Amino acid sequence: MDAPLSALRLPALVIGGFGIFTTLGSWPPVALPTWMLVDALAWPPSGLDAFATAESRLALAILGGVLLGWGVTLWSLSRGVAIPRAALHGMLAWFCLDSLGSVLAGAAANVLPNIAFLALLVGPILLASRRQTA
């Protein structure tokens, strides 16, 4: 394994793990740790009530999905996976976590735009992947 590529593994785990942690903030029964961290980072703290809105929980779901997708992409690259396939892995991870978090946040309607966005992205990625292997 190429040493520079394997160096991506720790950042991939941290970014992907933070994505999962962030998405937990979209589901109120387990959201408290995420809400506390975000509130502390947005100094001065404004109180956890701000996260009780569906919009805030949806934003956490979307952010968490994007971070997990980024982490999965980096992890795939660290394993020597071709760039188009690594991007596809990241997109699928984003789609799954963002969609799950959206449902848990009470914003299931966000799954429809996610499907459209995934379809828009997957076609060119699959085409690039086929060109690369041909």
Image (spheres, rainbow, N blue to C red):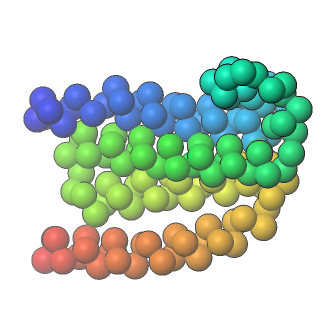
Vertical arrangement, residue 90 with respect to residue 22, above or below:
below
Vertical arrangement, residue 57 with respect to residue 47, above or below:
below
* Residue 36 in sight here: no
* Residue 49 in sight here: yes
Looking at the rendering, in which quadrant would you find the C terminus?
A: bottom left
22 or 134, which is in the foreground? 22
Residue that sits furthest to the front in the current view: 44
Count of number-bearing discs: 0
Which residue lies at the image location 57% right of the left edge and 58% below the top edge?
A: 95
Where residue 111 sits, quadrant-wise, is bottom right
Which residue lies at the image location 52% right of the left edge and 50% below the top edge?
A: 66
Q: Is residue 83 left or right of residue 96?
A: left
Looking at the rendering, in which quadrant would you find the N terminus?
A: top left
Where residue 96 appears, as percent x and y from the top left, is 59, 55
Q: Is residue 66 left or right of residue 102?
A: left
100 or 50, which is in the foreground? 50
Where residue 94 appears, as percent x and y from the top left, is 53, 53
Which residue lies at the image location 73% right of the left edge and 36% below the top edge?
A: 25
Where residue 52 sits, quadrant-wise, is top right
Where residue 132 appears, as percent x and y from the top left, is 16, 71
